[in-house]
Image (cartoon, rainbow, N blue to C red):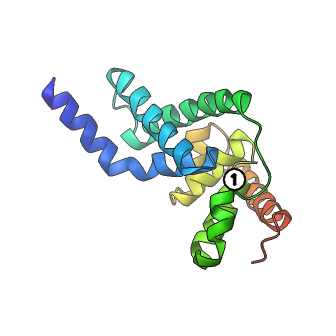
Amino acid sequence: MKNKEQAFLAHIESNKGIIHKICKMYMDTADDQQDLFQEIVYQLWKSYDSFQEQSRFSTWMYRVSLNTAIVFFKKERRQLETSDTMPEHLADEEHRTSEKELQLYHFYKAVQQLERLEKALVFYHLENYSHREIADNLGISEGNARVKLNRAKTKLKELIKLQGYEF
């Protein structure tokens, strides 16, 4: 049992960036992101025995994390009305926020508005997957992955501009 736990924790530690990105794609606030992070790790642990090592751990982890995020997001959305305005704590600190943080805020806010497949495409792109790898992971053709990714990027740019942020 101890070896299983150690292996699991090592996998999580080396791939935690995936979980953080998914959390930022689905949740606005740091508290919600932390809640989702914990829920994802819990779900990964619960389903760890089902990992058959037929794919990379990161690929399996991404699928479990994404499914958990979708369920979590739907629950949260039912409980709270979301706002299109910048959260108050960010608005108050905006003058102190670095340009990079502001860019990331607008990027993740826009990503949250994408469809599930578009989010997956953007995520894989951010993880430097090739078009072939993206296609294989999503079960679509390489050409389709390329076209859909370009459309998702264009949509992201439009959403960011609609937020009032200029590149």
Taking 55 as reference, is 91 left or right?
Answer: right
Residue at the spot 71% in from the left edge and 47% down from the top edge: 118
Residue at the spot 68% in from the left edge and 29% down from the top edge: 74
Q: Amino acid at mark 1?
A: Val
Residue 144, position as x, y percentages in the image: 73, 48
Taking 4 as reference, is 141 left or right?
Answer: right
The quadrant of the picture occupied by the C terminus is bottom right
Q: Quadrant of residue 9?
A: top left
Query: Is 134 located above or below residue 106 in the figure?
Result: above
Q: Which residue is mark 1?
A: 111
The quadrant of the picture occupied by the N terminus is top left
Residue at the spot 59% in from the left edge and 77% down from the top edge: 96
Residue 57 in view:
yes
- For label 1, the crowd category at 10 Å Cα-Cα, with few meaning under 14, some 14 to 19 and many 20 or more, is many
Frontmost residue, 63 versus 40: 40
Query: Is 141 located above or below residue 78 in the figure?
Result: below
Residue 62, position as x, y percentages in the image: 49, 40
